Image: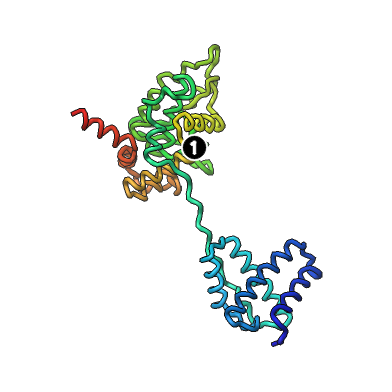
């Protein structure tokens, strides 16, 4: 092996990237920064030749960077730099093996979805504060049914706007929706959501705008013009509701989905129920073989609902 200094080999490699590979200056500078840090590490570890840098050294190097808070993405870039550098060293006869081959950077932890806690959820769903509602009683009744259904069944935004009245099975307390990949999901609906939907259906056809005709007779949720409620309208209404109830930040339909999953798991410890409810498996196929007990899931939902506890406490107080 050659006794050329480590720094000289780095400079030769950078010149190779610039002159032979034609890489942009910004890219070359990124390589330079990564290799300068690697050289500092090698010096600290008393590694005087690149050929003596082994995979266990690099594992320690990665762990050191991880403790310093370096993201998984940055670690991947640094390891890629090392691999490319050692490919060059091997080609030029300055190293026998590439210590970075097969070495993976630690994955960056996935950002947890934002949720509402049970108090915030109760505040959002509390009908007694409907005086602060952002619009007419017709809009309020519709929106409360929509909020309860989003939270009850963990529906996606696309599923809530495409829901149809005939898709509700009142006897089984379920709703049939078309989810991702155009796959059908049949999911339980909690009792409070069913009550809110019945209240909504009793006024649904009384459009607040005069001389408007219902153009989507099967649509569960309508706009005031009589057509199917759009995804954008749902988002706008949720934001208005959050503001009217004094909730911080922007309320997105997916937050209600995440919130219920979190509350359900905390309340029931039933991971299978959460999996089925959110449709994370091919539930339409699974139902054929498992004979899923939807009534049990609906009961789990009712116990998890934040206002269920409040109703019980109020009942005890009135005894």
Residue at numbered disc 1: 253
- Nearest the viewer among 96 and 297 is 96
**Residue 295, image x and y in percent?**
31, 39
- Nearest the viewer among 92 and 244 is 244
Q: Is residue 252 visible?
A: no
Q: Quadrant of residue 293?
A: top left
Q: Is residue 84 visible?
A: yes
The N terminus - image quarter: bottom right
- Nearest the viewer among 31 and 285 is 31
The C terminus - image quarter: top left
What kind of colouring is applied to the model shown? rainbow
Q: Image height check: is 42 above or below 250?
A: below
Q: Image height check: is 33 above or below 230?
A: below
Q: Is residue 196 left or right of residue 108?
A: left
Q: Please report the residue visible at 55 percent of the width from the left and 19 percent of the height from the top.
A: 225
Q: Quadrant of residue 146?
A: top left
Q: Please report the residue visible at 54 percent of the width from the left and 30 percent of the height from the top.
A: 236
Q: Secondary structure at mark 1?
A: helix
Point out the residue furthest to the top here: 211
Give the mark count: 1
**Residue 299, image x and y in percent?**
30, 39
**Residue 50, image x and y in percent?**
65, 81
- Nearest the viewer among 150 and 181 is 150
Q: Is residue 65 left or right of residue 121?
A: right
Q: Is residue 192 left or right of residue 115?
A: left
Point out the residue furthest to the left here: 319
Point out the residue furthest to the right here: 19
**Residue 285, image x and y in percent?**
43, 46
Label 1 CA crowd tier, 10 Å (few <14, some 14–19, many 20+): many
Q: Please report the residue visible at 52 percent of the width from the left and 43 percent of the height from the top.
A: 180
């Amino acid at each position: 092996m050659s006794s050329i200094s480590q720094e000289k080999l780095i400079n030769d490699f950078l010149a190779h990237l610039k002159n032979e590979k034609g890489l942009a200056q910004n890219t070359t500078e990124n390589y330079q920064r990564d290799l300068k840090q690697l050289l500092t590490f090698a010096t600290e570890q008393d590694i005087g030749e690149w050929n003596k840098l082994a995979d266990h050294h690099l594992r320690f190097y990665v762990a050191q960077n991880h403790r310093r808070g370096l993201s998984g993405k940055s670690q991947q870039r640094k390891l890629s730099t090392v691999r490319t550098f050692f490919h060059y060293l091997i080609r030029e006869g300055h190293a026998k093996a590439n210590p970075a081959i097969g070495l993976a950077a630690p994955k960056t932890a996935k950002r947890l979805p934002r949720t509402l806690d049970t108090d915030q959820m109760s505040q959002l769903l509390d009908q007694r504060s409907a005086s602060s509602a952002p619009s007419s009683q017709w809009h309020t009744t519709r929106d409360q049914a929509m909020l309860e259904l989003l939270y009850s069944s963990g529906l996606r935004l696309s599923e809530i706007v495409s829901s149809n009245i005939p898709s509700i099975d009142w006897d089984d307390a379920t709703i049939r929706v078309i989810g991702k990949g155009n796959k059908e999901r049949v999911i339980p609906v909690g009792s409070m959501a069913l009550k809110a939907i019945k209240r909504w259906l009793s006024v649904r056809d009384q459009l607040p705008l005069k001389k408007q005709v219902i153009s989507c007779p099967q649509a569960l949720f309508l706009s005031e013009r009589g057509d199917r409620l759009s995804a954008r309208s749902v988002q706008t209404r949720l934001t208005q509701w959050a503001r009217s109830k004094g909730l911080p930040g922007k309320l997105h339909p997916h937050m209600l989905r995440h919130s219920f999953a979190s509350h359900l798991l905390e309340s029931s410890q039933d991971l299978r129920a959460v999996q089925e409810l959110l449709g994370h498996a091919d539930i339409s196929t699974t139902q054929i073989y498992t004979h899923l007990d939807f009534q049990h899931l609906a009961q789990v939902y009712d116990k998890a609902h934040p206002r269920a506890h409040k109703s019980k406490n109020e009942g005890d107080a009135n005894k």
